[in-house]
Image (cartoon, grey):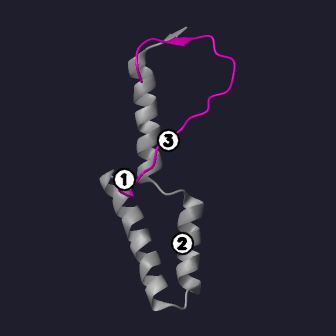
Amino acid sequence: MIVLPETTEDIVVRLLRLDNTRLPADIGWALEAGAGWETSEIAYSQLGAIMDNAKKAEFLGKPMCQDTGLPIFYVKGKFDSSIVGDI
C-alpha cells in the first residue's frame, strides 16, 4: 500500500494542532485542583492565567504557548507501505 504524502501530512498536521491547542483533561483537572489548594496569591493568579490561556487556545485553535517545541516521532511496527515525497 502506498501512503500519499498529502494523507500523511494531513494526519501529522492534525495531530500537532491538537497537541498544541488542547490541554489533556487530567492536566486541566490538576491545574484546577492546584489553584484550589494554592495559598499564594501570585501562584493562584498564574494558575488562572494558564487555565485561561488553555481555554482560549482550544477555542481559537491557536497554540497554548509561543514555544511549542520540536516534535520527534518514533514509529514502531510492521509496515507494508512507503511514503513518496516530503513530510
Start-end of magenta stretch: 64-87
Residue hosting label 1: 63
Q: Secondary structure at mark 3?
A: loop
In this view, 11 is above or below 44 = above
Residue found at x 40% / y 28%: 10
Residue 20 in percent (x, y) is at 43, 50
Q: Which is nearer the N-term, disc 2 or disc 1?
A: 2
* Residue 31 numbered mark, or none: 2
Residue found at x 57% / y 78%: 34
Please report contact status of discs 3 and 1: CB closer than 8 Å, yes or no. no
Residue 1 in percent (x, y) is at 55, 8
Residue 29 in percent (x, y) is at 57, 68
Q: CA distance from mark 2 to mark 3?
A: 24 Å
Residue 31 in percent (x, y) is at 54, 72
Q: Secondary structure at mark 2?
A: helix
Which marked residue is nearer to the observer: mark 2 or mark 1? 1
Which three-letter amino acid code belongs to the residue tagged 1?
Pro
Residue found at x 45% / y 32%: 12
Q: Which is nearer the N-term, disc 2 or disc 3?
A: 2
Which three-letter amino acid code belongs to the residue tagged 3?
Pro
Q: Is the residue marked by circle 2 packed among few (<14), some (14-19), or many (20+) residues within 10 Å?
A: some
Q: Is the residue marked by circle 1 packed among few (<14), some (14-19), or many (20+) residues within 10 Å?
A: many
* Residue 76 numbered mark, or none: none
Magenta segment includes 10? no
Number of marks in the rendered image = 3
